[in-house]
Image (cartoon, rainbow, N blue to C red):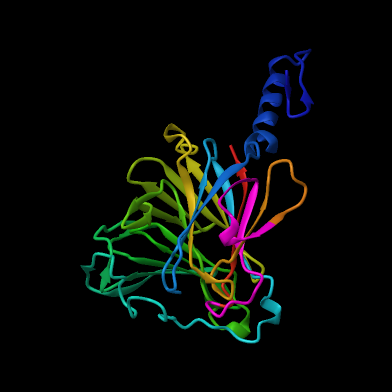
Amino acid sequence: MAHAGRSCSIGAFGAAITLACLLASLASPALAAGNVIPIDVDNHLTPTTCAEEDNVSATLSGTDVARFTVEALPPAYLASLQGDRTASDFTGCNFNGGVHPADPRFAFRPATRVLFDGAQWRIVGITQSSFWRAQRVPVKLGARTFNGIHLLQIFKKVDGKPREIAVLYPSDGNWRIKPVPEARFGDGAYGSSILIGPIETRQRPMVAISAISVTKLPLALDLKFVGGGAATITLDEVSTLRTSLDVRLTPPPFSKHGRRPFAMLRSMYVAPDNADVSEVTWRAPGDASLRTEALAGVGALRARQVRFGRSVPSRHNSSAPDLRFSDFRD
């Protein structure tokens, strides 16, 4: 029998050889990693004049995706950026800060708790005074379980100082990630959001999580979904060059639902210079090179990797990262 390029035969050593070959095959990266496969991307862009409204919803769908990578990467123009713009801009909006008028509102007792503070990581849980969903998702870390957390903040220790690089909203499943900000940008800025898991729409797209368990070394979050299935999301790399998430879906990947989306990018686009994402770069199956199109010109595409980003400096969240999805495996 042959496994990943190694030949094994039963000779004088009999079962010992067979067992050795079996162990080698199980350890083979080719078998363990799975095959790289393409996915479908659908851009559901709606027009808006409000820079504080998510009008970009790009779904990623596939039948056999069990693992993929999400990276937050600095925009191409970052080195030439003279300053950052992170202030809210409600020009063109039908609301002025606070809760979106289409959202319900549930009241809570506000609180901020440090859940973990170690040599590499700091994790903080925040309960807000109001949130658009009533659900309280338990967050387990070690022997302790915390309830009612609306915002889970993840800080990477850089030279002993905590730098926020990711947040998760347990009640609606929204993630935001960014590389470690350059010192000249202070805390830097988040831009687009990510949903990972079975997507559903309740007033807005979301993922219903039933429980979260945090593992500290390596830092990983195990998510259980209300409708069944789970995901393990590991912070694979954190630097000024990128923050990378390794995502593993169980079962892979909601295949009983056909081509149901397993991830979604949520973002904002008003104009190329007023957007958190203004263009899409992707590699189609069989292509050796990348293609780039303006966001508004992209409908549906099939890709082995896809990057949502900006090449024109934006006056909204200027330093916010591009987001790349890649390495889809069955």
Quick one: 291 or 254, which is closer to the camera?
Answer: 291
Task: Determine if residue 236 is in view.
Answer: no
**Quarter of the image holding residue 128?**
bottom left
Residue at 27% across, 58% down: 136
Judge whether 146 appears above or below 330 on screen. Answer: below
Asked whether, in this view, residue 83 is left or right of residue 220, the answer is: right
Judge whether residue 313 is colored magenta.
yes
> Residue visible at 70% across and 26% down?
20
Is residue 20 visible to us here? yes
Range of magenta residues: 292-317
Which quadrant of the figure contains the N terminus?
top right
Q: Is residue 261 left or right of residue 304?
A: left
Task: Tell me if residue 91 comes above or below residue 173 in the rendering.
Answer: below
How many numbered badges does the structure rendering display? 0
Residue at left offset 40%, top offset 53%? 213
Q: x, y percentage for residue 254?
A: 45, 38
Q: Position of residue 8 (x, y in %)?
A: 76, 20
Q: Nearer the viewer, residue 279 or 10?
A: 279
Measured from the top left, where is residue 70 in percent x and y? 57, 56
Q: Quadrant of residue 130?
A: bottom left
